[in-house]
Amino acid sequence: MGRASLSRRVALFTTLGLAAVWAGAVLLMAAVLWSEQDELFDQQLVETAHVLLPLVSRMQAQAVVVEVPQPDVPMDEALLYRLVARDGRVLRQSAQAGRAVLPDPAGLAPRRVVEAAGYRLYATPFNASGHALQIAAPLAERREAFREGMTGFLLPMAALLPLTWLIVGWVSRRSLAPLRELGAEISARDSSRLDMIDAGDWPQDLMQIAGVVNGFMARLSQALQAERAFATNAAHELRTPVAIALAQTQQLRESATAPAQIARLDALERALQRMRRLVARLLQLARADAGIGDSAVAHDLAALTRLVIAERALPDAARLDVDLPSAPVMARMDPDAFAIVLSNLIDNALQHAPPGSPVQLRLRQGAVLEIANPGRAVASADLAGLTQRFARHGGDGFGLGLHICQQIVSAAGGRLEIVSPAPSRTDGFVARVTLPPPPDREA
């Protein structure tokens, strides 16, 4: 599972913080509501008792018998009363009070609201007739009223939490959009693109970050330019002396007669030839690092391939099995850059293929170039490292050819794929270059 984005983290923690504040507010409101509700119900209980006392006391003094229909009210909702004398006798009570378990009448102090046996009770003081009224309200009714009130409040409030998550997520995404833009701008930079980031419309904090990144890229650009200039100048300076030394060695080889001298001159010529190839690779590396590859116009890769093969005049050119389409294969790639890529891939295939074995070169429509050679398969764990600079896999190479190809092809907007073993085989090596085709109007 991937890490959450910054906007999602902001939305999550903001919503959790609001939820905590909301929960605390709900708990505080519940406590206040319960207290105020109790106070209101107690006040109603007291007023009801004082209103009923004169009426019930007069009825008791006049021995009035009143048949009052008893509504079918559950016990946990019925309001109970009883009229008591000074000696604690119950003189009159509601019908349901006889079925309830209430405290001893003599034990209830007047003018006090108490809670007992699941009821809230209040007793009036004795009047002139020596009567007092005790009234009891069930707590279950109060709790039900509290639950209904809280439910009516909590349901719409709970629905606000998902809405809060959506709103905070939207706000955080909009607010952090410049940060994502900065990340995209930094990701787009590499060794071939070190231009400054324009942060003129971003918040002040991101402008400071962009300024630091721009300063770093400026220093990195200077270092890379110095490195490329050194490599290019060194290669240029070495190319002429190496060519002269190679020519002198070849002249000495033609005039030499002693076998030992011929052997030493042959070894010297091989070393100079290797140095000449290294100088050529360094020049190609400098051009690849400079970002060559892309072209403003499309070129025919089939014609370029024929030209490169003809100009190379390889001593083992007969080993190349070339398959080119008769129709042009158009792609927007610099011709010199394509020649460098093609030459390096051919050299790599010829070098690692068994002596005398054929190397297949295929160019297909869609700007797909494939060069395949037989040979020992490369372990899948080693394939990704073959395009690294100075990464060697046997042979007499310098570990630069595939890296140069990778740099140039990437700059052209294409991709270099390395497959080993070859498809439908247990050995072999395939280098596949796929270039983006030009728009239809250019093709």
Image: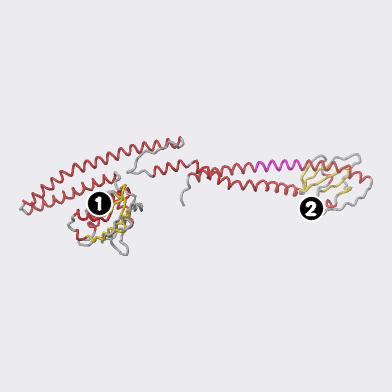
Q: Looking at the magenta stretch, what is its main secondary structure?
A: helix
Q: Position of residue 37 (x, y in %)?
A: 73, 42
- In the image, taking residue 235 as reference, residue 192 lies left or right, namely right
Of the residues shown, which amino acid type is indicated by label 1?
A: Ala
Tell which of 125 and 231 is nearer to you: 231
> Quick one: SS at disc 1?
helix
Residue furthest right as drawn = 62
Describe residue 264's horizontal placement relative to residue 33 as left or right. Answer: left
Is residue 68 highlighted in magenta? no
Of residues 322 and 284, the one nearer the viewer is 322
- Quickly name the residue at label 2: 75
Residue 382 appears in view: no
Q: Which colour scheme is used?
A: secondary structure
**Residue nearest the viewer, comparing 242 with 412:** 412
Q: Distance between the residues labelled 1 and 2?
A: 99 Å
Amino acid type, label 2: Met
Look at the image and give the residue range highlighted in magenta.
Answer: 27-40
Q: In which quarter of the image is residue 44?
A: top right
User: 31 left or right of 243?
Assistant: right
Point out the tag, 1 or 2, that comes first from the N-terminus: 2
Please check the rendered image and state whether residue 33 is part of the magenta-colored stretch, yes or no: yes
Badge 1: residue crowd in 10 Å (few <14, some 14–19, many ≥20): some
Residue denoted by label 1: 339
> Left or right: where does residue 109 sit relative to residue 292?
right
The residue at the point 77 percent across, 51 percent down is: 76
Q: Which secondary structure lies at badge 2?
A: loop
Where residue 280 appears, as percent x and y from the top left, is 21, 47
Rendered residue at 40%/42% (across/down): 185
The percent position of residue 308, horizontal first and vertical second, equals 22, 53
